[in-house]
Amino acid sequence: MAALAMRRILVDRIRRKSALKYGGGVEHLNADDLDLCETTPDERILMLDEALNNLESVDPESTRIVTLKFFGGFTNREIAETLGVTERTIERQWAYAKACLLEMILSSG
Amino acid sequence: MTMSRQIEKALFDALLNLSDVGLREAFLEQACGNNTALRKRMEVLLLAHEQTVRFFDMEPLQAGIVKNVVEKVDYNPPEEKSRSLEEANAYIGRYKLVERMGEGGFGVVYLAEQEEPVWRKVALKIIRLGMDTERVISRFEMERQALAMMNHPHIAQVLDAGATETGRPYFVMELVLGVRITEYCDQHKLDIGKRIELFIQVCMAIQHAHQKGIIHRDIKPSNVLVTLHDEVATPKVIDFGIAKAIEGHLVKEGTAILQEQLIGTPAYMSPEQAETGGRDVDTRSDIYSLGALLHTLLVGRPAFDADQLQELSVEKIRRLVSEHQPLPPSKALLSLAPEELAKVAANRNCEPARLIRLLRGDLDWIVAKAMERNRQRRYATVNGLAIDLQRFLRCEPVSARPPNRLYQFQMLVRRNWVAFMAGLAVAAALMIGFGVSTWLYLREREARREQAQLLALAQQSEILTHAAFSVRDGKNEEANNLLKQIVKPPERPSLDGVSAFRAIGDWLALQERWKEAARCYVNLIHLDQLDQWGSVTLDYQACAVLLMETGDLSAYAQFCRTTAERYAGETNGDAAGRILKSCLLRPPDADLNSALQPLGKTAERWFARNASNQWAAIPVSLWYYRCGDYKAAAQFALSKEGQSDLSAATATGCAILGMALFHEGRVEEARENLARARKIVETGFATRWGATGSLGSWYDWVFARILLREAEHSFQRI
């Protein structure tokens, strides 16, 4: 729960910051136009958030892992304990989730 | 999750395990067969996977998230990079970072190792907010010198200070591995006495720092750790002066940095800190925080509920801290739920009921005095607080208590005279040492000046104590001489002063040294007003009488004015009566008359319920007389009680009756009553009223005499 909250708050803040900087709403970041190495962490988080929203409907499990790990900062072990599975499972799921999301980000726009 | 997704995941995982590209190809071939869509998908995923390392670079991003969301600081990417850089290189100055210990209000604390000149482990604190390096460093240098000069077993030493390559300032401190004092006490189930002993040691440390001119500003449980030093539990205060060193540089325009990050922890912050944002703060601020800490040690939770504070905005916190008077410890305990109270008591190794009893009274007073919203009413020095606590431990009366009877009080003086003087002497002696560098000298001089002011205040108390002591020994003339030294009216409530002034004032009055007595009583009234508890209205009466006797009519008028205003709202009938009659020794002018109206009414009500009491009759009948209602005045002047005896009250009643009758035209009766009054007064004075107290104290007699004089004077003008 806390991790979700953090994610929402963080994205909000970044959006607001960008709005201040660029004025008006934040446009959807076009992944094609961006070289990944040059994105700022802010932008990455926004992209990630969007991708997560999309992923949620098809793969809630992966979404959850990412939210917990990335936004909540929990270790694999902590997540494993919370969800009642092995650490190895979490590692697997985390790897898969990352790849999925990145694929979504790269292919969107 | 759909079947296809599950398959995807399984395949993905399997593929990752195969590091050899050729093997992967083969596997894909096998697993996907004709399913080109699946195969494509897996290839894409694998590609993406390679990129994930860069995209999901966890450390900086995550650190940023934590900071951004949890600590409300402006998200600042360059800092993030430098921080992970620091962690990567693991060297700051000549200190090697070993492990991250935690995050505080301003920065991160690392466990570090120092190699030159001597190997030891230290605590290194990096201040996080972006600041102007040079300015900050030079300031740090000075602070560091000052802090380094503090050599006290209970203060964590600051060893070094500097700036990282990226320009962030850091402090190197003596590593204190310990638990918070609150936790320590709970873990070891220390009883109240032991907790206080531990706390007194903390006080000593803070006092030491104050004499060096350093205010901590952020005293709270997490800054007072308890470690084991040679098997002995030793408290250590950490983070000294750091709050101050940083404070000057946190003002960034526009941003809410200063707003949102209150320096200090709300629950332990003094009202002046909350209000001014820490600008107008002195050593007494630390005393407040110490009081709050003591409260927590005694009660198990802070005086201002931390949870409650989390919810509030900064504005509200400020207002709450500066306006709200927290519950005293014993009452705070009562407000806990039974299970909580049981837990708190268990942690203090005693029963709930007994715990409350223990805290009620002296400890309540001590905490309240330390946490006074008005800093002039707090203990002037930490020493004062410590000494009071020591008195408590020795079951002796404590100075924070409200006034008591003269006799008991003189006992108190005798018992504690030595301790009090000793504390002052030590403080004075300690203040004589100077630092070497000019800057330190100046700084210390300023601190000394401040301490000297406080010392002067304390000295005034000392004189008063000395005087009370002399009174006890019967050396009244000596006491009088001491009291003459108090030229300015005393500024702090003082039990010594109250008893000394009153005793000497009385003694002088008995010798008819009216002027000197008046001076004593004026000072006494002043003290009475400083004290939130006493409306010692008998003193006002005595003062009124004295001022009249000295013939200083303007002083008397002034006295009446201020007193009437002050007590206009008095609800206690007895007190109202005394004030009223004190102000009516002469016919009042129009202003005074209207000011006295409310008192008049209160006195009437009182009299209605106490019609047989002569003391209650006097204010009322005198009031009627002054208002011109002679009939009523005559009617009420003498109560049933007053018909027969020879007290000053009766004499007064007769005098008033006489005057009233005279105005009614009943001259003969008037003359009789005046004669009677004169007889009583003469007898009373002849037998030196001091000998017996039951017929009236000296001021009652003088009061009667004044009225009698007035009566006879007007009588002669027929």
Image (cartoon, rainbow, N blue to C red):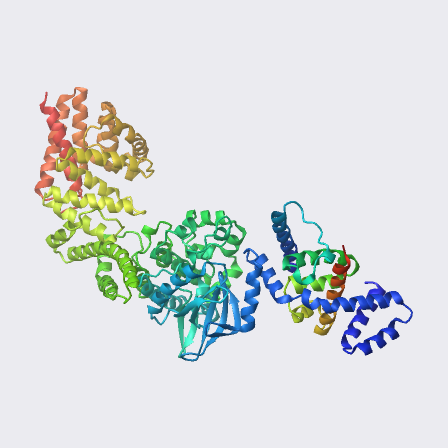
Q: Position of residue B179 (x, y in %)?
A: 47, 70
The quadrant of the picture occupied by the N terminus of chain B is bottom right
Please name whichever residue, B293 or B545, is drawn nearer the observer in this view of the structure: B293
Residue B586 visible in the displayed image: yes
Name the side, left or right, on which B430 lies relative to B215: left
Above or below B575: residue B196: below
Q: Position of residue B534 (x, y in %)?
A: 29, 46
The quadrant of the picture occupied by the C terminus of chain B is top left
Q: Position of residue A6 (x, y in %)?
A: 63, 57
Please name whichever residue, B387 or B120, is drawn nearer the observer in this view of the structure: B120
Q: Residue at x 77, y 76 (%)?
A: B17
Please name whichever residue, B140 or B507, is drawn nearer the observer in this view of the structure: B140
Residue B509 visible in the displayed image: no
Residue at the limit of the structure toward the right, as seen here: B34
Q: Quadrant of residue B23?
A: bottom right
Q: Quadrant of residue A47?
A: bottom right
Name the side, left or right, on which B344 lies relative to B540: right
Above or below A88: residue A54: above
Name the side, left or right, on which A102 lies relative to B688: right
Q: Position of residue B143 (x, y in %)?
A: 37, 63
Tag count: 0
Above or below B645: residue B139: below
Above or below B585: residue B630: above
Residue at the limit of the structure toward the left, as seen here: B686
